Structure formats: C-alpha cells, structure tokens
Image: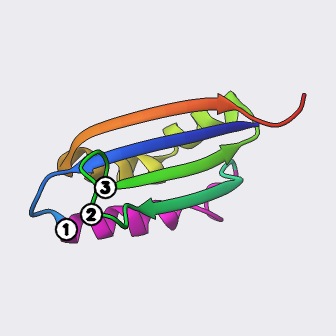
C-alpha cells in the first residue's frame, strides 16, 4: 500500500478557489477507483507552514500514477497550480508485506 501525502501553501486572496479546489479534490474519492482512502485537511491553527493537506492511499505505485494521470484529477490539480505558493509531497509504503 502507498500513502500519498501532499501539503500546500496557498496565495492570500484565493480563499474561494482554495475551497473549490479542496472540495473538488475530496470529490474524487469514490469516483476514481484507484483512490482507496482520501482525507483532505485544512490547517485549523492558521500555521505558517502549510494551509491544507491530502492523505490518500493507493494499492501500489501503478495505481497512484493512474490517479495522477486521470483527467478528473488533472482538472482539479490545474486549479491548485494556479493558487499555490508551494507544494510538498511524500509517497510512503505502508502496511505489512
């Protein structure tokens, strides 16, 4: 199992677009079959490092790559690219083999 974790910092003044992006991202769960688990989180404390995060699980790297290349994901991702300052991602293998 692969856990895909992504963290974003957004530009000020893009709050409407941020909500649209995060809602769209969460909406991919149950639509893209490779996405086995999905949590979209907002920073509740107003921290200066990141504003939001995605924690998502995939069966393997092939499933993750299929998700990344799905047109529905690419559409949501395009909005994020237009409003983000920074993005950090970690893909980790989880669970017993």
**Magenta region, residue range:** 15-33
- Residue in the picture at 15% in, 62% down: 14
* Image position of 9 (left or right of 33): left
* Image position of 75 (left or right of 34): left
Dot 2: what SS?
A: helix
- In the rendered structure, are the residues bearing label 1 and label 2 in contact, judged by CB atoms less than 8 Å apart? yes
Residue 42 pos. (x, y %): 39, 63
Judging by the rendered image, the residue that carries numbered circle 3 is: 51
Residue 59 pos. (x, y %): 76, 39
Dot 1: what SS?
A: helix
Judging by the rendered image, the residue that carries numbered circle 2 is: 18
- In this picture, is 51 found above or below 81? below
Residue 89 pos. (x, y %): 45, 34
- Neighbour tally class for label 2: few under 14, some 14-19, many 20 plus, Cα within 10 Å: many
15 and 21: which is toward the camera: 15
Query: In this view, which residue lies farthest toward the right?
Result: 97
Sequence order check, earlier mark of 3 and 2: 2
- In the rendered structure, are the residues bearing label 3 and label 2 in contact, judged by CB atoms less than 8 Å apart? yes
Which quarter of the figure is the N terminus placed in?
A: top right
Q: CA distance from mark 1 to mark 3?
A: 11 Å
Judging by the rendered image, the residue that carries numbered circle 1 is: 15
């Amino acid at each position: 199992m692969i856990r895909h974790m992504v963290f974003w910092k957004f530009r000020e003044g893009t709050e409407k677009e941020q909500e649209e992006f995060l809602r769209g991202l969460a909406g991919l769960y149950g639509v893209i079959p490779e996405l086995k688990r999905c949590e979209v989180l907002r920073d509740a404390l107003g921290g200066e490092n990141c504003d939001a995060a995605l924690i998502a699980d995939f069966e393997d790297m092939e499933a993750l790559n299929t998700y990344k290349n799905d047109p529905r994901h690419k559409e949501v991702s395009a909005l994020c690219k237009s409003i983000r300052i920074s993005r950090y991602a970690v893909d980790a293998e989880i669970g017993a083999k």
